[in-house]
Image (cartoon, rainbow, N blue to C red):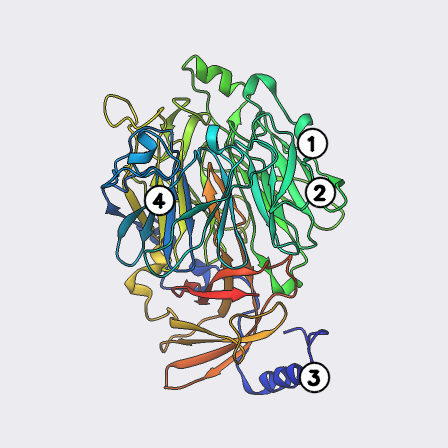
């Protein structure tokens, strides 16, 4: 436990002292399920199961996000032509023609396995999004009529919630832009876009957008930019990590100043759209006081892939992944290879701290008809293992998920996988890869019933009295049931992302400080005392999936709100 926290109040310090003497100490670090649980073998990783949930979601999952009401917002573009979900009555609401008669957004109810139609007015093609602290999805930009638009989706328990579009617009057209939530301002920064070498804030906090020379420097004219949808991560000190093409910087958006220029990532190719790679911040850990921030970037397209794809020649994508610590004073990319080449993949952080790499293709680049050879086998990456032993190949799917596909982690532990439309408009027949509307779930082996004797169950978050959440640095309780077999116990919190175009915007996992746990009501009921992360930059305010992990086996998640 590392002693008493310097920031604790007298009453909190007394509570911590009592915990030190009266409770069992939680796990000190990340857990590798294969090592900690003898019942599991390496071959068990191949027992991850694919399940078809729906044959037709109605719309393509170009964009996808999980809300704190256990519902998933799915949407594509209003100018894609007739979708497979026609309204009973054509809606006028500012739309016209096909977009007024066909839904291009749905809400998927995870528990009921059903979708209901939502209403989008302007085009959201290749737009961006971020959750605000109250759980509202702030959605920005798109193409044509939607390129400067600001939209909100406030989730609700009922079926009454829908999209709201503001009359106020952004300053600049933002197509293929990225966004990141800024916790201090409770606003969003929107960066880049086609022919947009600047950034701005939503809601507006200035009278103009700000030029970002970094985007000019990373632009490749003959490759459709190769710096669109730049990768954005929030560091533990409030500075922004911005990656585009092969370069990256640490940026102080308040002073409009580049604080660091990082080394160029090795490899003969680019990592940003249309040479689309993917990225995560590896889990932040209380054991080093959240002081280490490490970024990982995987895959991308070979040099010249965009031009070659226009001639229907699809170059093999990049196999390499790079890891770099962006805190401290020494920075270098540590490279390793995936089992195969990959572009347009999604990277998700799992409750175990492992990274799932899923979807995409092996050749070409992002865009309509510009990729081939679907990547059907997901990869599992274990960051705490030795180099050369970190990647595992999982069970393949039979459904190609190419351009305009996405994947998100659900609170029940499954991975929701959807989308794929490498065609202009909805084309269901007569092409190599038709528009894909089937919805799948990938279930990790550790979520199967044979590990239920280890799995913490019925997890509940208990806030301080009369509170509706927990503040940074404060103690809260987590209750759960546990069987007779107990391994190392840890608690993690996961910020669900806005997923689109291989980016999981604002995705974040923090391994929380667990002071100890003791028996609660009932012989198998326990209660853990947990400390919320100390800073809004480590864990920005908002809703998190909280998971208790026992011996490498995660519970189903409960929602935690950090104020």
The residues bearing labels 4 and 2 have C-alpha atoms spaced at a distance of 33 Å
Instruction: Give the position of the C terminus as an image quadrant.
Output: bottom right
Q: Mark 2 or mark 3, which has the lower sequence index?
A: 3
Q: Residue at x 69, y 74 (%)?
A: 5
Q: Position of residue 520 (x, y in %)?
A: 43, 85
**Horizontal side, residue 508 vs residue 379: left or right:** right
Task: Give the SS element for disc 2.
Answer: strand
Q: Label 2: few (<14), some or many (≥20) within 10 Å?
A: many
x and y percent of residue 99 in the render? 34, 33
Circles 1 and 4: CB distance less than 8 Å?
Answer: no
The quadrant in which residue 91 appears is: top left
Which element carries disc 1, helix, strand or loop?
A: helix
User: Sequence order check: which comes first, mark 4 or mark 2?
Assistant: 2
| Left or right: 184, with 351 as reference point | right
Q: Is disc 3 surrounded by few (<14), some (14 to 19) or many (20+) residues within 10 Å?
A: few
Residue hosting label 4 = 417
Considering only order in the chain, which callout, 1 or 2, is on the residue closer to the N terminus? Answer: 1
**Residue 142, image x, y percentages:** 48, 34
Residue at image location 24% in from the left, 40% down from the top: 89
Give the residue at mark 1.
214
Location of mark 2 (residue): 251
Mark number, residue 29: none
Q: Where residue 448 appears, x then y in whole percent?
A: 30, 60
Counting residues from the start of the chain, the first of labels 1 and 4 encountered is: 1
Which residue does the image show at 66% across and 56% down from the upper left? Answer: 184
Residue drawn at (63%, 65%) of the image: 287
Residue beneath disc 3? 10
């Amino acid at each position: 436990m590392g002693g008493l926290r310097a920031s604790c109040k007298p009453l909190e310090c007394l509570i911590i002292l009592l915990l030190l003497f009266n409770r069992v100490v939680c796990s000190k670090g990340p857990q590798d399920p294969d090592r900690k649980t003898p019942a599991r073998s390496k071959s068990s990783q191949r027992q991850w199961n694919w399940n078809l949930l729906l044959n037709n979601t109605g719309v393509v999952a170009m964009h996808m996000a999980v809300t704190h009401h256990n519902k998933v917002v799915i949407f594509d573009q209003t100018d894609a032509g007739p979708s497979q979900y026609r309204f009973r009555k054509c809606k006028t609401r500012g739309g016209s023609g096909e977009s007024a008669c066909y839904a291009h957004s749905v809400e998927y109810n995870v528990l009921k396995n059903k979708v209901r139609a939502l209403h989008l007015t302007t085009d959201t093609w290749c737009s961006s999004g971020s959750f605000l602290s109250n759980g509202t999805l702030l959605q920005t930009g798109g193409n044509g009529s939607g390129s400067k638009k600001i939209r909100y989706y406030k989730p609700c328990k009922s079926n009454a919630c829908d999209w709201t579009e503001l009359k106020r617009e952004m300053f600049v057209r933002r197509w293929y832009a990225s966004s990141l939530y800024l916790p201090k301002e409770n606003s969003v920064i929107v960066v880049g876009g086609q022919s947009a070498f600047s950034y701005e804030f939503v809601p507006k906090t200035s009278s103009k957008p700000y030029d970002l020379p970094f985007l000019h420097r990373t632009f490749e004219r003959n490759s459709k930019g190769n710096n669109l949808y730049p990768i954005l991560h929030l560091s533990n000190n409030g500075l922004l990590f911005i990656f585009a093409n092969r370069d990256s910087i640490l940026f102080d958006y308040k002073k409009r100043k580049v604080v660091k220029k990082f080394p160029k990532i090795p490899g003969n190719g680019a990592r940003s759209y249309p040479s689309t790679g993917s990225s995560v911040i590896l889990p932040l850990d209380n054991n080093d006081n959240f002081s280490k921030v490490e970024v990982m970037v995987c895959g991308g397209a070979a040099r010249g892939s965009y031009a070659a794809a226009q001639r229907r020649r699809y170059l093999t994508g990049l196999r390499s992944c790079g890891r770099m610590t962006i805190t401290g004073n020494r920075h270098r990319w540590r490279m390793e290879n995936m089992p195969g080449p990959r572009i347009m993949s999604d990277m998700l952080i799992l409750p175990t701290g492992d990274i799932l790499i899923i979807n995409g293709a092996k050749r070409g680049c992002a865009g309509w008809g510009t990729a081939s050879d679907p990547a059907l086998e997901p990869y599992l990456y274990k960051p705490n293992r030795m180099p050369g032993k970190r990647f595992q190949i999982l069970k393949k799917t039979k459904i190609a998920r190419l351009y305009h596909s996405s994947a998100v982690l659900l609170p029940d532990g499954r991975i929701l996988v959807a989308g794929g439309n490498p065609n202009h408009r909805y084309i269901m027949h007569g092409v190599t890869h038709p528009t894909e509307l089937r919805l799948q779930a990938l279930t990790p082996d550790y979520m199967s019933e044979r590990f239920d004797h280890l799995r913490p169950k019925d997890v509940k978050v208990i806030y301080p009295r009369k509170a509706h959440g927990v503040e940074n640095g404060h103690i809260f309780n987590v209750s759960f049931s546990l069987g007779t077999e107990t391994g190392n116990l840890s608690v993690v919190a996961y910020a669900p992302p806005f997923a689109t175009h291989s980016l999981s915007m604002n995705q974040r996992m923090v391994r929380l400080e667990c002071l100890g746990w003791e028996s609660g009501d009932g012989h198998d009921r326990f209660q853990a005392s947990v400390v919320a992360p100390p800073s809004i930059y480590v864990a920005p305010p908002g809703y998190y999936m909280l998971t208790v992990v026992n011996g490498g086996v995660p519970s189903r998640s409960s929602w935690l709100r950090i104020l």
